[in-house]
Structures are given as C-alpha cells and as structure tokens.
Image (cartoon, coloured by chain):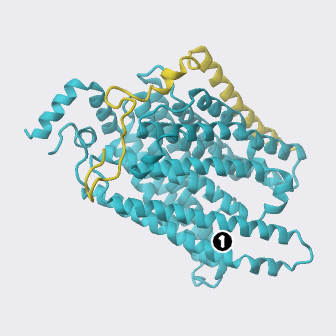
Chain colours: A cyan, B yellow
Amino acid sequence: MSTTSMVVEQSEAAQPELVARAEIDRSCRVPVLLFAGSAVFWLVAGSLMALVAAIKMHTPGFLTEWEFLTFGRVRPVHLNMTIFGWASMAGIATLLWLQARLARACLPFGNLLIAGGVVWNVALTAGLVEISIGHGTSVEWIEIPLFWALVFAAVFAVVMAASLTMFGRRKVAHVYVSQWYLFGAVLWFPFLYLTANLLIHGGFTAGTTAAATNWWFAHNVLGLWLTPIGLATIYYLIPKVIGAPIHSYHLSLLGFWSLALFYNWAGTHHLIGGPLPAWLVTVGIVGSVMMFVPVVTVGINHHMTMVGHFRRLKDSPTLRFVVFGGMSYTVVSVQGSLTSLRSINEVNHFTHYTIAHAHLGVYAFFSMVMFGALYYMLPRLTGREWGSARLIKLHFWAAALGIALYWGPLTIGGWVQGLQMNNPDLPFLQVVAGTIPYLWGRTAAGVLMTVGHCVFGLLLLQMLRGGGHAQNPARSQAATGGEVKA
Amino acid sequence: MSPVYWLVWGVVVAFALSAVSGLVWAIQHGQMERFAAGARSIFDAEEPVGTVTDGFPRREGRSGP
C-alpha cells in the first residue's frame, strides 16, 4: 500500500464527510461527465456555426455554395447547438451534481441518465440535420421538429425524476436556496417545453397565438431553465470557494420566491407593438419590471458576499468565471427590465441591440457560470487537475473580452440602428449599411470567444485522457472507486 | 378570444400557483426559520467555514488547494 493510500484511510476514519462526499461524486461521475463532455463538444461546434453566421451578416456571399450553409439554416443550427447542446447539457450536468451534493444523496438512475445523455445527443443531431436540410419549423427557439422535441421531453422526465428522488432522499432537513432554484428548473421547464411544443407544432396555434406561445416559451428558456440553474450554481459556488456563507440568507430566499412569482409572466414583452391584446403585452411588461425585486436582492447578495474576498479572484478559476457571470446577471436583468418598457422598446425592437442583450444573458451570465462550475466539478469527478493554469487564464480572458466586445458595440450599434429605422427620411439600405462596422466587431468578438472555447475543449480532452496530475485524496477517491493512486 | 390564450395563461397561472404552494410548504415545514444555520448548511467538518476550496493548478499540471 502506498503512503498516500494510508494517509487517505486515516483521513477517512476521522472524516466521514469525506467518504460520503466521495461516494456521492462517484455516483455522479459517468452521467455528469457524459453531459458535460457533450456540452463542451456542442459549445465548440456551435461557436463555429456562430462564426459562419456572423461573417454572413457583413459578407453575404460567404459560403453560399451549399444550401445547408445559408444564413436561414446556419443561424438556427447555431442557436440549437448552443441552447440544447451546450447550455442545457452543461446545465443538466451541473444540476445533477449540485442536487446530489446539496441533498447529500447519491445520484439515482445512473444507467438511465447515461442512456438519456446518449439519446439527447442523438435527438439533437437528428434535429440539427432536419434544420440543415430545410425541415426546420422556422419557429424561433423551437426549430427542431416535434418528434425530436418529444424525445428531449422524455429525457427531461428522467432528469426530473433523478433530481426529485435526490430531493426526497436528502439527508439535510434544510432546503438550501440553491435547491429551491434547482427545484424550480426541473419542475417548471419540462412542462413549459412540452406545452409550447405541443401547442405550436400540434396545430393548436397559428398567427398571433403562435407568436404569443413562442415568446412566452423562448423568454422562459432563460427565465425558468437557465437562470435558476445559473443562480443555484452561484449561490453554492461563491460561498464554497471563498469559505464564507452568503451575506444575507433572507435576501436569497426573497430573491428566489420573487423570481418564482414574476419571471414566467415576462415573455410577451417581446411582442410590444404586435397585433395582440394590449393587456397580454402589458402583463409581460409588469412581470419584467417586477423582476427588479429578485435582481436587486441577488445583486446585493452576491456583491456583499464577495466583499473582503475579491483578492481570491486572482487564485480561483471557478470564482473568476462565476463572479463574472453573477455581475452579468445583474446587468442583463436590469437591461431586460428597462428594455421591456414601451418607450425604450420602440427604439431597440428589431435591431442588433436585442441580439447583444440575448448573448449577455446566455453567454456573459449563464455560460460563464457554467464554465466556473465545470472547472470546479470535473477535477472532483475525474480525480485529475486541470492541465494548465495559463490555458485556463487564456480561456477566461478570451471569453470575457470576447463577450464585452460583442455586447458593447452591438448594443450601441443596435440603438443607433433603431433610432435611424424610426426616422422615415432615412432609406432602409442606408440604415443597414450603417450597421456593418458593428457587425465586423461582432465577428472579431466571435473569434475571441471561439478561441476560448477551443482552449476549454483542449483542457477537457487533456483531463479526460488522463493528462492532468492526480488531485487531492477527496477528488481522486471519487474517481477511482476508493483506491487512491499515489 | 382564442382558447389558446387561455390555455397559455392557464399554464402560467399554474406555474404561479405551484410557486405559491411551494412557499406555503416551506413556511409550514420551518424552511423560513434559522436562516443563519441554513446559510451554513453547505459547510461541514471536512470543508468548514474559512476553507478555500478552489485554486489554479500551482504549476503547469499540478493541483491547487
């Protein structure tokens, strides 16, 4: 027996939490790695499709020889790769691991979840092929045909069952705030997804009713799926990494319950000016403005928890990404609430401003938090450390500068575009030509972010192939079934 | 008005009601009490308050805290 193994056995005897945590991590290992690894694959693939779409915006003749690479197909392929490939699969990986850690219960239905991960990848690939060959539905965020959407819904059901089972088996009586958010994500989103798909693709809606259903769903992909998972992760990882409880637990719970009550009403603000009943749109605006309550509570809480610990950002990759994501959540939410006001929306609607806003939410907030979560989770699941601090820093700066370069200029450019479109004296083509410099900036930002994603993929590959060094005993034990390799 | 509006808003109201039900459950089961202990529930003897649990690899390919 190696010296390391003896040390671990002694520490096990003295620290039952260590053994329990290793057991929980071991139960998560294969399903979570499958979802996380797939997520990173789709992230890289989705970034490349985004680049193609971005270039086409200012150079329309780029790659027009093949139908499947025309803008109308590349753009939804990018969206579905990043939302249902990257964001949802990274979210499910994080959700499962977090719920297991917080409930202090092993992950159940391991084989079913592994099968679910495989089926999810197959369904997504099939859906992307359908879009690429012209069989997409053309309904934004629901472009994948109904059959494959039902397959996703079946996998959602397995994830929901696993999460609720762990919640039911929890060994801690107190329900931590992150668990409430996870609870919301797994309870609300699968029903939302199924309802929207059946209503829109099942022939129950058309015209304005389809649009109302569409934007109620699309906005809630962020509101009831990505946001709860992202905030749950932040509320767990910031305190865990810095070793200090969150600043105000009262505020954290107020934040969750106000989000639960207000967020799902907000989607119809996307249809301001559309031919819908005024009250329907107004309800969406009211819901959006009420979101100031959870956003302010979350913003204050995250900031005040970090006060006195900001120096840790220098040392922790997880903290860098998660704090960046947390700050972006405040910015994107405040921007979103303001954007829902009719007086502002009449300028920014149908402009690049909205695209910048969407990326601020899904990338600067959610994706950055997921990067941080994966940097924290994966060494504990594989028992191996990340291979290079320099590459992690390169990933962070490429992603952070990339999204800053994306959001800033495109927001300004979009606003100018909106003001010009509202001026009847300006020819439309002149307005379009005015956006081209901002669109070049968007492509440059996309290159930066894609570089970061490729670096992240490289780091993950290196870790999965066993290139990194063995981690501390708690992490190694989870990965090797109790035997710690010296 | 199309019945679809009512169906969509019915689901919206159902979501809101599920949130209210969860809130009632939380209050009845003592989840809104002892907040300080709740905030510390993610820490344990192995990783107590004050323990930093993440860091960059110390050198290329070496483990952090």
- Which of B5 and A483 lies nearest the eye of the viewer? A483
Relative to A44, A146 lies left or right:
right
Q: Residue at x 34, y 52 (%)?
A: B56
Dot 1: chain letter: A
Q: Is residue A159 left or right of residue A457?
A: right
Q: Residue at x 45, y 69 (%)?
A: A451
User: Quick check: can you spot residue A89?
Assistant: no
In this rendering, the answer to whether A398 lies above or below A156 is below
Of residues A429 and A151, the one nearer the viewer is A429
Report x, y in % for residue A171.
41, 22
Q: Nearer the viewer, residue A415 or A279?
A: A415
- The residue that label 1 is drawn on is A72
Query: Within the image, what quadrant is residue A344 found in?
Result: bottom right
Q: Amino acid at mark 1?
A: Gly
Q: Secondary structure at mark 1?
A: helix
Near-viewer residue (A472 or A190):
A472
On screen, residue A155 versus residue A393, left or right, reads: right
Q: What's the residue at 41%, 40% (across, down)?
A: A241
Which residue appears farthest toward the right when viewing the image?
Answer: A425
Query: Where's the N terminus of chain A, which quadrant?
Result: top left
Tell me, yes or no, if residue B1 can be seen here.
yes
In the depicted structure, whether residue A292 falls above or below residue A416:
above
> Please, is residue B56 above or below residue B14 in the view?
below
Q: Is residue A367 above or below residue A394?
A: above
Image location (x, y in percent) of residue A454: 42, 66
Residue extending furthest toward the left: A1
